[in-house]
């Protein structure tokens, strides 16, 4: 029996801290899993620290998160939903934000916004064996 190993890529993140006294922006490169042209999933960072078991879906061209701090099941759901919009995720972020097809992915509109607030959302390794992406 052969185990499938998902390919990984470097993901450059644009991280920002909106602290009024010490605002900052930095770039960080992490390892992620490509899910579609222009999109990758990676372990979420919080204040520079890995949140193992929590994942983000990131737009590769901008380094900005489309969805973040999700369990493995919900980050898969976010990736499937993002691909299903039909948006060209290789385009610049401003074009993607202006595209009305992304409205359902925005905070407060997405099905996975409640992730982490129920017992089914537990930390687990990504990619999951039953992932619809792989």
Image: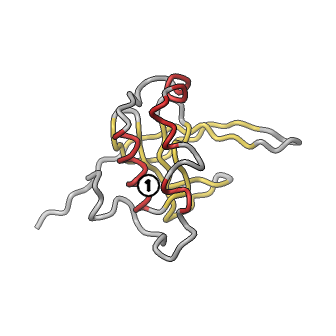
At x 82% / y 44%, what residue is drawn? 19
Describe residue 62's horizontal placement relative to residue 15 as left or right. Answer: left
Q: For the view shown, which residue lies furthest in the right direction?
A: 21
> Which of 77/62 is in front?
77
Describe residue 104's horizontal placement relative to residue 4 as left or right. Answer: right
Query: How are the residues colored?
Result: secondary structure
For disc 1, the neighbor class at 10 Å (few under 14, some 14 to 19, many from 20) is many
At x 48% / y 72%, what residue is drawn? 122
* Residue 13: percent from left, percent from top: 55, 39
Which residue lies under the disc numbered 1?
A: 75
At x 56% / y 37%, what residue is drawn? 64
Above or below residue 87? Residue 34 is: below
> Which of 115/10 is in front?
115
Above or below residue 97? Residue 18 is: below
User: For residue 21, which quarter of the picture?
Assistant: top right
Above or below residue 102? Residue 123 is: below
Q: For the view shown, which residue lies furthest in the left direction?
A: 1
At x 46% / y 50%, what residue is drawn? 42
| Numbered disc 1: secondary structure | helix
> Which of 97/43 is in front?
97
Describe residue 134's horizontal placement relative to residue 51 as left or right. Answer: left
> Which of 29/126 is in front?
126
Looking at the rendered image, the quarter that the N terminus falls into is bottom left
* Residue 28: percent from left, percent from top: 58, 41
User: For residue 40, which quarter of the picture?
Assistant: top left
Q: For the view shown, which residue lies furthest in the bottom direction?
A: 119
User: For residue 94, which quarter of the picture?
Assistant: top right
* Number of marks: 1
* Residue 130: percent from left, percent from top: 27, 64
* Residue 105: percent from left, percent from top: 50, 43
């Amino acid at each position: 029996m052969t185990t499938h190993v998902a390919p990984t890529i470097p993901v450059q993140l644009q991280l920002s801290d909106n602290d009024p006294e010490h605002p900052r922006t930095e770039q960080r490169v992490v390892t992620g899993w490509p899910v579609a042209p222009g999109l990758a999933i990676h372990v979420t960072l919080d204040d520079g620290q890995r949140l193992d078991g929590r994942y983000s879906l990131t737009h590769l061209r901008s380094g900005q998160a489309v969805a973040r701090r999700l369990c493995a099941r919900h980050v898969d759901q976010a990736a499937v939903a993002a691909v299903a919009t039909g948006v060209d995720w290789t385009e610049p972020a401003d074009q993607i934000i202006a595209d009305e097809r992304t409205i359902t992915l925005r905070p407060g509109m997405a099905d996975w916004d409640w992730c982490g607030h129920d017992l089914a959302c537990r930390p687990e390794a990504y990619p999951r064996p039953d992932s619809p992406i792989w």
